[in-house]
Image (spheres, helix red, strand yellow):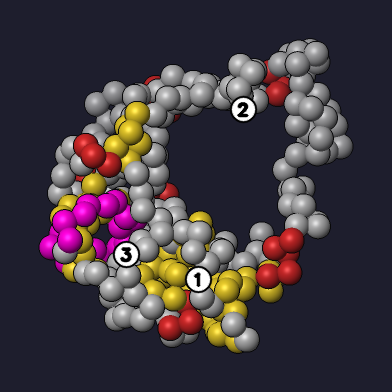
Amino acid sequence: MKIYKPTTPGRRGMTGVDYSTLTAKKPHKALTRGLRGTGGRNSFGRITVRFRGGGNKTLYRLIDFKQEKRGIPARVQSIEYDPNRTAFIALIAYRDGEKRYILAPKGLRAGAEILSADKTSLDAGNRMRLLNIPPGTEVHNIEFVPGKGGQLVRAAGSAAQVLAHDAGMTTLRMPSGEMRKVHSDSFASIGALSNSEQIMVNIGKAGRKRWMGRKPHVRGTAMNPVDHPHGGGEGRAGVGLKYQKTPWGRPARGVKTRNRKKSSNKFIVQRRTK
């Protein structure tokens, strides 16, 4: 964690991630694509997500979430920063010469060798089927549907824990505390993800948030009644309602939003706790 000196009011209390552990400043050009911001607008040009827009230009890094090259060892060439996600990424080179980006787990260093196979060692960065991972092991980038690529546990510092195997299903404890079942034929990567200090970063000033493409978030109580259910009133007024509402009049904060009829509900063993 990097702590800045209070040379200005914006710098006072500001913190950042220490990037001294990274080994490359520029991304691998063949694995990057241009990325155009939406400004929170849909295909009709209407704003569907408020308070987005601007920000620094970024290049999208093509991440290999599948790692379907089985049994071919790959050497880590560099650990890099990715502006499109909170975790660091690793550039790996397979023995046949192909290079790809993967999510970098904690402890992975340049020069290390990793392997994706049905069964391999429990070293950080290796990838194998959940069926062959012993209980108690931390995993990330987990496939929800076998062969589709990792969809679960991809944020910085996060990891799921393998609890048990039974009848072709593996029970996992997710970072949220939820316990759910995943098909045992699904692949997962070993270890917790890198950049665990990211959650402790203090933005420090509004301008830094603008660099990230986030506009000022206006409070509902500061608006007029025509613009928000919380708006209006003389002076600094409160919400004035029994429950808080969204700008569209629906209940907000603490309300369950998950579809009760979602097909994957049957795989949840225990819900996350507040």
Disc 3 residue type (three-letter): Lys
Secondary structure of the residue carrying tag 1 is loop
Outermost residue on the front side: it is 96
Picture quadrant where residue 28 is located: top left
Q: Is residue 16 visible?
A: no
Q: Is residue 91 above or below residue 174?
A: above
Mark 2 sits on what residue?
49
User: Residue 97 location, x and y as percent?
Assistant: 16, 56
Report the disc number at residue 269.
none
Disc 1 residue type (three-letter): Ser
> The C terminus appears in which quarter of the rendering?
bottom right
Alpha carbons under labels 1 and 2: distance apart: 33 Å
Alpha carbons under labels 3 and 2: distance apart: 38 Å
Report the disc number at residue 69.
3
Closer to us: mark 3 or mark 2? Answer: 3
Residue sitting at x 72%, y 22%: 221
The one nearer the camera, 187 or 122, is: 187
Secondary structure of the residue carrying tag 2 is loop
The one nearer the camera, 36 or 240, is: 36
Mark 1 sits on what residue?
186
Closer to us: mark 1 or mark 2? Answer: 1
Mark 1 / mark 2, whichever is N-terminal: 2
The magenta segment: 96-112
Q: Is residue 99 visible?
A: yes
Left or right of residue 10: residue 228: right
Secondary structure of the residue carrying tag 3 is loop
Alpha carbons under labels 3 and 1: distance apart: 15 Å
Mark 3 / mark 1, whichever is N-terminal: 3
* Residue 102 lies in the magenta-colored region: yes
User: Residue 249 location, x and y as percent?
Assistant: 82, 30
Residue sitting at x 34%, y 75%: 117
Residue sitting at x 56%, y 24%: 40
